[in-house]
Image (cartoon, rainbow, N blue to C red):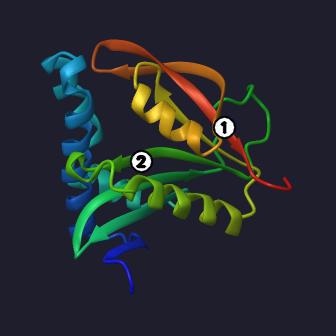
Amino acid sequence: MSSPLRISLAKANTATAAQLANLGRQTFQETFAATNTPADMAAYLAENFGPDIQMAELQDRENTFLLAHMQNELVGYAKLRDNSALGLPEGQDEAGRLEIERLYVRDDWQGTGLGAALMRGILALAEQLHCTAVVLGVWEKNDKARAFYQRFGFREVGQHEFRLGQDVQTDLILRKGMAGR
């Protein structure tokens, strides 16, 4: 029996951009509103989520979006960035590194295996692309996400600043080397 979950590559169109903007705002707010000021949240959401912003991201050749649909409803997505320099010393070659910039799952779908399914899709794509590593930044205080990534073999390799409105926070940089590379 097949699963009603469908993970697919996004196409750059206005409907997808609007869906990504809405889901991005919703999931970011669900996850971080309680631990940040309303002003900082509003500033971050305005700077990062809107149909025009997501359309530009969709059209950027360095980005790939994996969409998770459950019965034709978008319930999660991953935004991936090819050739990421995240965590590398300046001047080091970033070729072959895939960055998970966003891995968002709607709150009511967390704990269902949807995030794991998206991660398996990301790692399969990294294999197809012959990536040497997959990297990401995760807020140091997001214990739930850190534990999730650790289950998939990601390890801390550094940290960097993440600005949320006026608040400068610390993101941990996590890396997973790909087999044989």
Residue 46 visible (yes or no)? no
Q: Is residue 124 above or below residue 86?
A: below
| Residue 36 image-quadrant placement | top left
Asked whether, in this view, residue 149 is left or right of residue 98, the answer is left
Identify the residue at horizontal 26%, vertical 70% (top origin): 70
Asked whether, in this view, residue 15 is left or right of residue 116, the answer is left
Q: Residue 63 location, x and y as percent?
A: 50, 56
| Residue 122 image-quadrant placement | bottom right
Identify the residue at horizontal 55%, vertical 60% (top origin): 120
**Which of 25/31 is in front?**
31
Q: Residue 39 location, x and y as percent?
A: 15, 18
Identify the residue at horizontal 59%, vertical 28% (top origin): 173
Asked whether, in this view, residue 150 is left or right of residue 7, the answer is right
**Which of 94/38 is in front?**
38
Q: Amino acid at mark 1?
A: Arg
Q: Residue furthest right?
A: 180
Q: Quadrant of the N terminus?
A: bottom left
The residue where tag 2 is placed is 103
- Which numbered disc covers residue 175? 1
Q: Residue 113 location, x and y as percent?
A: 39, 57
Crowding near pointer 1: few (<14 within 10 Å), some, many (20+)? Answer: many
Q: Amino acid at mark 2?
A: Leu
Mark 2 secondary-structure assignment? strand
Identify the residue at horizontal 43%, vertical 63% (top origin): 66
Asked whether, in this view, residue 84 is left or right of residue 47, the answer is right
Q: Label 1 to label 2, Cα distance in Å?
A: 15 Å
